[in-house]
Image: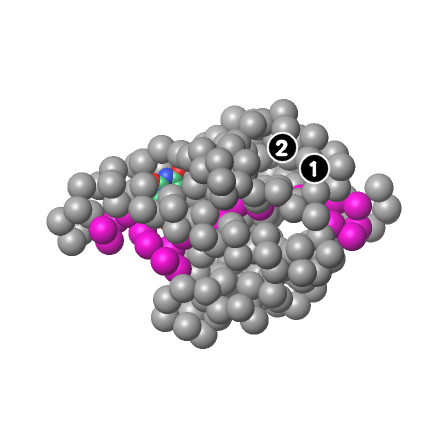
Amino acid sequence: MPESARYKRVLLKISGEALMGGREYGLDPVTVDRVAGEVKAVAALGVQVCLVIGGGNIFRGVSGAASGMERATADYMGMLATVINALAMQSALERKGVQTRVQSAIPMASVCEPYIRRRAVRHMEKGRVVIFAAGTGNPFFTTDTAAALRASEMACDALLKGTKVDGVYSADPKKDAKAVRFDRLTHLEVLARDLQVMDASAISLARENKIPILVFSIHEAGAFAEVMAGRGRFTIITDED
Ligand code: UDP
């Protein structure tokens, strides 16, 4: 591993909305391509990378449930949305020459591989980017939790959360001018202050498995690789000194 990378294996979580670009819904191909470029740059450092992508740009279970649908059914629709995003990202990465595999928590034999933990590890050891689709495979969960779960199962050194802003703030900096930015937090502080980084079950799972969470802006060019090198702007959530 080159000196420039601090971590050997990482999981990057991005929301579906991060792939929307300026659109109101769905996927913006230019944005998908740009994010794929960020992933390629990190894979090129020799870091093993896996991805969890949300589905909120297409469908969210809670909004389906709000319009009268049974929550579990709506959640399954949300999970299918994440498969669409995973396939779009796979295609963008492979166009750039990055080898990938999509593994779905809901088996979909003719579309992608089923989730098999040891197989996913093997793919990463061979330098393939593994994209985990369909969240945890269970309704009433989120892709944040799926990210913490897969990062734990893959024994990742870090969980990266690519967001709209360059770290964790005390309030939404786009809405509140007084919002304070944190450089460093513990998992417990995030939970106690109810900071909106990832949902509480994801934070708890990362805490139990001693996985640091690094929050950075996925919209800033080159930021993912910079964060991997310990440079650039990010908030680190860790229980270690
Ligand atoms: N979902 C689910 N179980 C999971 C992951 C996701 O039921 O393990 C559903 C849930 O309905 C969620 C939707 O998939 O609203 C899309 O995922 P999420 O909202 O986490 O996407 P993001 O906000 O990251 O784009």
**Looking at the image, which residue is at 53% across and 57% down?**
88
Q: Residues within 10 Å of mark 1 (few under 14, many from 20)?
A: many
Q: Which mark is residue 120?
A: 2
The amino acid type, in three-letter code, at marker 2 is Ala
* Local SS, label 2: helix
Are the residues tagged 1 and 2 within 8 Å (C-beta)? yes
The amino acid type, in three-letter code, at marker 1 is Met
x then y, percent, for residue 165: 52, 63
> What residue span does the magenta drawing correspond to?
43-64
* Local SS, label 1: helix
Mark 1 residue CB less than 8 A from any atom of ligand 1: no
x then y, percent, for residue 149: 50, 32
> Does residue 60 show up magenta in the picture?
yes
**Looking at the image, which residue is at 49% across and 69% down?**
28
**Looking at the image, which residue is at 25% across and 48% down?**
62
> Does residue 1 show up magenta in the picture?
no
Residue labelled with disc 1: 124
Is residue 177 rendered to the left or right of residue 212?
left
